[in-house]
Amino acid sequence: MATGVQNNQGEILIKNVTKIYDPEGVHVVAMKDCSFDIAAGEFAVIVGPSGCGKTTLLNAIAGFDTITSGEVYLDGELISSRDKQIKPDVERMVVFQNGALFPWKTVMENVIYGPVVQKRMKKREAVDVARKMLHQVGLNGIEDKYPEELSSGVQRRVEILRALINKPKVVMLDEPFRGLDAVAKTVMHEFLMDIFCESPRTMFFITHDLDEAIFLGNKVIIMTTRPAQVKKIVHVNLPWPREHHMLASETYLDLKREVLEAVHEEAKKAFEAGEREMA
Amino acid sequence: MISRLKAGVTDPHLLRALTGILVFVGLWYLFTAVLNLPRFKLIPNPIAVLKDWFSLMPASGRSIFTKVYYLDIAYSVGRTLAAFTLATVLGVTLGLFMGWNRTFYDFAFPVVEILRPMPPLSWIPLAILILPGVEIAVVYVTFIAAFFATVLNTLLGVFSIDKNYFLAARCLGSKPKDVFVNVIVPGSLPFIFTGLQIGMGISWMSLVAGEIIAGKQGLGYAIYEGYFLYQFEHIISYMFTLGILGYMSSAGIRAAGRKLMAWESRRRGA
Amino acid sequence: MRRARGRWPDTMEMIRELRLKREFKKVFNIRLLRGFLSIVMFVVLWQLVVFIKVPYLENLPYPKDVAVGATEAAGSRTYWFGWGISLSRIFAGFIIAQIIGIPLGLAMGISKAFKDYTFPVFEMLRPVPPIAWIPLAILFWPTRELSIYFLVFIGAFFIIVINVIQGVSNISVSLKWAASSLGARPKDIFWKVLVPGSLPSIITGMTVGMGVTWNVLIAAEMIAGQGGLGRMTWEAYTNNNIPFIVVGMISIGVAGYLCSTLVRWLGEKAMPWKKRF
């Protein structure tokens, strides 16, 4: 478990969350009575078949959407329930799946956007901090470039930095490395790993990549197919900081087997349910 | 160097373009001057048109060497510019506000949607009656045409912005004002500029009609006057002038767009 | 909906609640209310502006006068004849523009050589506003009616060709290759891939073109036509029958809107696959 979290912040409690979509008479119970905890500073990875409500939880925590029933707590404070939904705020940052760097702003303008718009830092100060952060992770010389001029890998890292410069309590990443090739992914993992070890904060990481899940996470939360619930929680007791040779260790392979079995079972169920829907 | 020149001159695209143009002009000349087909009797032939357009003492009194020509251009361009600028300023502002604030949209949309389908030129009689002076009426009708097109395209631009940019901006602590300045305005620029080009084309179209129906002086008016005075040569040269001016104004907007949206042109691989 | 202390509502209860909320919104939709309110405010403002004699706008007719004029028109035969004349002109010019324009656009989109020959001339003529063609059209065509059809044609023609060219170029090369490898001959590729693939752009071209042609028709009628809604509105102007000018404008707007809706509806019918998504 990572140590050194400031004031033990970023503890998330999910209690009996249910989400029902009801567009035009055909109701879909996306999630039912889902409950689990994420400790402060923990790197939690959520895996599961598509449509299993991972995004529902992210939306509830971030403040993008409501839940039908149940409760979500952040550091003891109720942030989402049937009657209450907190609005998006800096303490719960999101890194989006297809990237949401503002295409009309340069890298530097993107990264300093948060602190400047919140009036927490003057522009010059923010530029210094951002420059240091970029330099620290080896992203030099891209300050004045527009996102579309850069490769996806670089764009992702910049977006993560844009989130982190705000020192959020919780960082939610929705399949951030999806679509990157395997080589680029290893660089991303190392990048995220370094950042996480340097200043730990609660991570809520959604992915389909099981290797990625085990490599990055403290615990892997496997969701069932619709209606989603927690199927299994696998604690990853590999030492920190993680290194790539661990991917060949016995411990890792055991963990992988455990996760794979659980996921495969649910994937089959989802597949059959989908076929039944079509038939 | 010579080889590059040769390559340029023998570029198949260029050659075909020239051939096409020559064929068109050739047929035109054939039908009007040579064969004297009945239908084409009153249509001036291309040589006559060119001679008149570029002559020092044109029969129609309007050529590139006469003051009247440039006066007509000035009138038309001035009207179009005035109407277009007003339409852009008001239209983009309205469109952006409607896209930004839902309440504002709910109030504004029905009125806009009812007034919009009315063809701009159908406003002419009413405008002439109500507004002081024909000049204002013509500019007004041109304005109306460009205005609604601009509002629509701006709205479409705002709606085209990926929802995630709004969510990201809010996560990063933006107030509604920040979202407007940092997401809505830059995000809708591409659509706005497409809309401006369309608006420019519409402006010219309405202007000419307005000039014909109600104006004095200006390219459209002169075309119609030419028809009445049996001076047909300058009808065609004026039509081409309109075409050139229209093309130049659209190109100008495109250039301005490229400047403002530097990020679009610097795409990877672009 | 209160729940017993400590008990979570079950699924069916939650669904019922969601549905109730939705039905409620349908009736007491605040957004529709705002829209309705704004139209009412607009009419009230209109009445006020004329009543207190705002400079220039005081010459507008009262809303009531317009309503009276509208009922008069609805009972008049000439009025509906005007509709018929305008509509027939629109359809004639518009349909001919599609018949000539769509194949031309397809040809220009498919054959680079053909496009090289024809596009420059096309692009030279396109920026000329349709209204500027009026004198030329009158000189050329034997009857007024034909020249009006020609003007409507010009309005719609350039738009449809440009849209079709873009539509063809948008069809992904992979589709054509896939068809080829599945054994399609050029004729099949044309009819089964290119034509349906460019259908969305064709529909867009028709919709935009329809809007433009109404504009052109009204101007043409005001300047040169006999009969038709544009002519009627102009005559109301020369007869100083101001309420009827407004009635004419509204009629033109409604007619244009109906035609555009028709084109859009045809478009949806022609592309059933679009609806599913």
Image: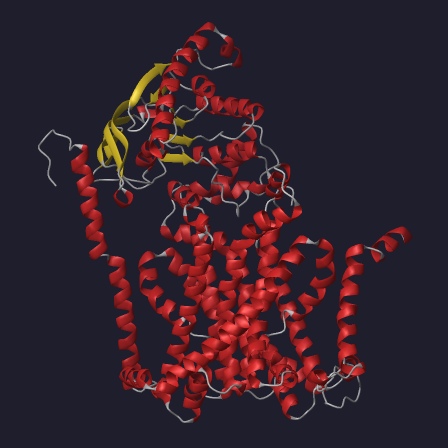
Q: Residue A134 at what x, y percent from top left?
A: 54, 32
- Above or below for A238 versus A91: above
Quadrant in the picture for the C terminus of chain C: top left
Q: Residue at x 45, y 10 (%)?
A: A252
Q: Is residue A105 left or right of residue B73?
A: left
Q: Is residue C180 left or right of residue A121?
A: right
Quadrant in the picture for the N terminus of chain C: top left
Q: Residue at x 42, y 11 (%)?
A: A257
Along the line of sight, the residue nearer the viewer: A194 or B146: B146
Q: Residue C66 at what x, y percent from top left?
A: 31, 83
Q: Locate residue B118: give its quadrant.
A: bottom left
Q: Residue C220 at what x, y percent from top left?
A: 53, 81
- Above or below for A170 versus C81: above
Along the line of sight, the residue nearer the viewer: C129 or C151: C151
Along the line of sight, the residue nearer the viewer: A223 or A136: A223
> Is residue B174 shown to the viewer in this render?
yes
**Which residue of the protein is positioned furthest toward the top in this rendering?**
A250
Q: Residue at x 49, y 29 (%)?
A: A177
**Which residue of the protein is positioned furthest toward the right in this rendering?**
B2
Q: Locate residue C172: give its quadrant.
A: top right
Along the line of sight, the residue nearer the viewer: B2 or C130: C130
Q: Is residue A160 left or right of residue A36?
A: right
Q: Locate residue A146: give its quadrant.
A: top right
